[in-house]
Image (tube, rainbow, N blue to C red):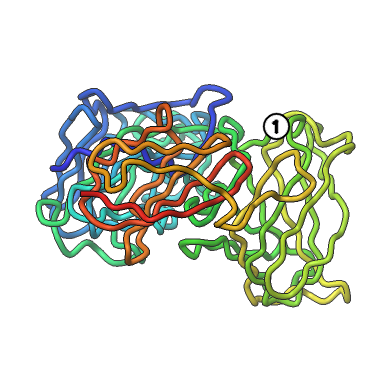
Amino acid sequence: MKKNTLLFAFIAFAFIGNAQKVYDFTGSANPGSWVAAGSGTSLAPSAEGLVLEFNAGVPRVDITRAADPFVVSDGTHMVVTLINNSTEVGSFSGFFDKNNGNTGTQFLGYQTGMIQANSPGSGVEVTYVFKLQSNNYTNDPGDGTLNDTDNIANMEYVGIRFRQADGSTNLSGDSATNGNVIIKKIEIVNAGILSKTSYDFSSDNASGFDGLNGGSVSYTGSELSFTGDDTNTAPKFAQQFFSIDASSYQYVHVVVDNNTSNADQIKFQFVDGASATQTYGNQSLALGASTIDMDLSGKAEWTGDITDWRIVFSNSGSAAVDSNPITISRIVFDNSPVLNIKKLDQLTFSLYPNPASEILNIKAVDRITKIKLFDISGKQVLETVKFNNGQLNVSSVKKGVYLLHVEDENHSIAVKKLIIY
């Protein structure tokens, strides 16, 4: 197994509180109540985390039923940090006991768009978030009639399972051939514990985003795609997991890559500290591509930590919004009236040595906030927001020609060719 020394922060967030339940498997920690399930599946502790080996099929990692009761109040979302060393594993799903009057297990929709290894054993560290759905996520009545073993309102059986990139196809190969998965940490947290100011859907998935009022959200692998249902006049999508410090960020920018719907208006909406829904101004939404800049400054309700905010679409003729997609590549909260994304050739940075084999030095005028690495086929093999003194360790990246994308604190982007030998 090839050891990965590069940190990939798939979702760049900051802790503003403590997770309700944390299972940290790094440093050769024992898996405790977590066990492997599925054909030929095993878990072994290592310095990086729990090493999941498996045969073809649907490998899983589960909390042993009743061994470590997961109380409903522990959290509404699961945050999973892992290294996907497999070239075949491309999606995963969470599951838990229904505990609402129905026996059996509630399986959640698959998180597609997992970063697959460029070659077996060459995975990078990724953090994913998914919501524990509320429709069956309720307290057990405690009457002993369900799949409950202790008459306590808990979810005694939770876990994650892995499949191919489409989310529905079982794995056809084993980890010995295609690479394993290393699980570093699993956290059960409530909404609002983690904070996030910038969503770049070329790397971020649609974690925490939900369609409301007839709206639907999906993730294309590089964009958030939103559709109406042809019946509602104000469909919307909401971010209901990550919080935003409204007192510190006065503008929100929505980069629309393509609007093919009949929606020609867009609004910003949020739930304030008093649990009241606030809606700010209508702006025009053009067909095709556009960037919407919304000024939230001076709005008395826009203050403190906001966990539930929405983007609302409508038609000026009061027609229902149709089901043609609106695709969005970025959503950014900052203090600039206009989103400052420069053209690729307007940000300059130095890169040395090039070719590189171990340590890569990257220097720019403004602070670098994100680095991505793509191979010549366009496949992303690395993303990181953590590097020390402008240095990046590329020793675990296989030899070849790459494109290095660098982003600074102003959201300016530049690209250079990099050779690793």
Asked whether residue 303 is in view, the answer is yes
Please say if 27 is above or below 221.
Answer: above
Please say if 170 is above or below 295.
Answer: below
Counting every numbered tag in the picture gives 1
Q: Quick one: SS at disc 1?
A: strand
Q: Residues within 10 Å of mark 1 (few under 14, many from 20)?
A: some
Which residue occupies the foreground of this view, 395 or 45?
395
Q: Is residue 374 left or right of residue 100?
A: left
Q: Quadrant of residue 299?
A: top right
Residue drawn at (65%, 76%) of the image: 323
Residue drawn at (68%, 69%) of the image: 289
Q: Quadrant of residue 233?
A: bottom right
Q: Position of residue 44 (x, y in %)?
A: 15, 34
Q: Amino acid at mark 1?
A: Asp
Which residue occupies the foreground of this view, 280 or 68?
280
Residue drawn at (42%, 54%) of the image: 416
Asked whether residue 146 is in view, the answer is no
Q: Quadrant of the N terminus?
A: top left
Q: Which residue was labeled with disc 1?
A: 245
Q: Quadrant of residue 408?
A: top right
Q: Is residue 260 left or right of residue 366?
A: right
Q: Position of residue 295 (x, y in %)?
A: 83, 46
Q: Is residue 224 left or right of residue 254?
A: left
Residue drawn at (79%, 46%) of the image: 337
Q: Position of residue 343 (x, y in %)?
A: 61, 58
Q: Position of residue 77 (x, y in %)?
A: 50, 40
